[in-house]
Amino acid sequence: MRTFTASMLAAVALVFASVAHAVPQAGDVPPPYLGKDQRGKTVDLKDLRGKVVIVTFWATWCPPCRKELPVLETIQQHAGRDRVRVIAVNIEKAMVYRPMKRRLKDYKMTLTNDHNGRIKKRYGVNGIPHMVMIKKDGTIAAVKRGYSEAMVPAVIDEVNALMRAEYAVAANSR
């Protein structure tokens, strides 16, 4: 009886562990908390429903990340914060992030820092760049992992296609 009980407890623990660490995929609702923005305000995806949201995990030492940030900033500026929100989650220690944040102070995109790795873990980020594209309904449209610098234009094309599709649906439903 003890063996059976121990086996059942182990099985239940495994089920809960796998659910707790499930990697968000297309169709899922992603973890809502994305840190604090440049002004110290909590960034929560629940507050961004009705907008396309692009979440990118990056670091200063990542060439594709450095290449995509200015392009994502251009998207943020042209589309406007009422239609799209680009959130760039830096995964480095705060002492590395702070000087970079000052250099990017004129960026319109939202910058956060995951210095303790909790957000990265919830999103299943095990390499960067790592981008999560979220539809207006709050579900994940696509996840891009570990793409090269040469692939950044294709990833940005997907971001633009998502925005066109999401806003075409809104225009057609009027």
Image (tube, grey):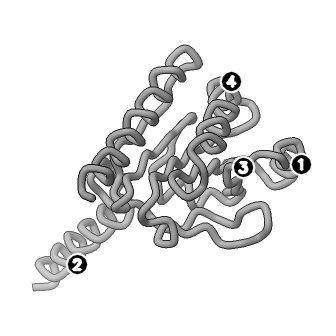
Left or right of residue 95: residue 109? left
**What residue is disc 4 on?**
63
Specify the farthest residue to the front.
174
Q: Is residue 129 above or below residue 5?
A: above
Q: Amino acid at mark 2?
A: Leu
Reply above or below: 173 against 104: below
Q: Residue at the location (41% across, 51% down)? A: 134
Q: CA distance from mark 3 to mark 2?
A: 49 Å
Residue type beneath disc 4: Pro
Mark 4 in CB contact with mark 3 (< 8 angstroms): no
Percent x, y for residue 117?
A: 62, 56
**Pick the front one: 171 or 103:** 171
Mark positioned earlier in the residue sequence (4 or 3): 4
Examine the image and state in which quarter residue 28 appears: bottom left
Residue visible at 42% across and 63% down?
50
> What residue is disc 1 on?
102
Q: Which residue is mark 3?
A: 108
Q: Which amino acid type is marked by label 1?
A: Arg
Front position among marks 1 and 3: 3
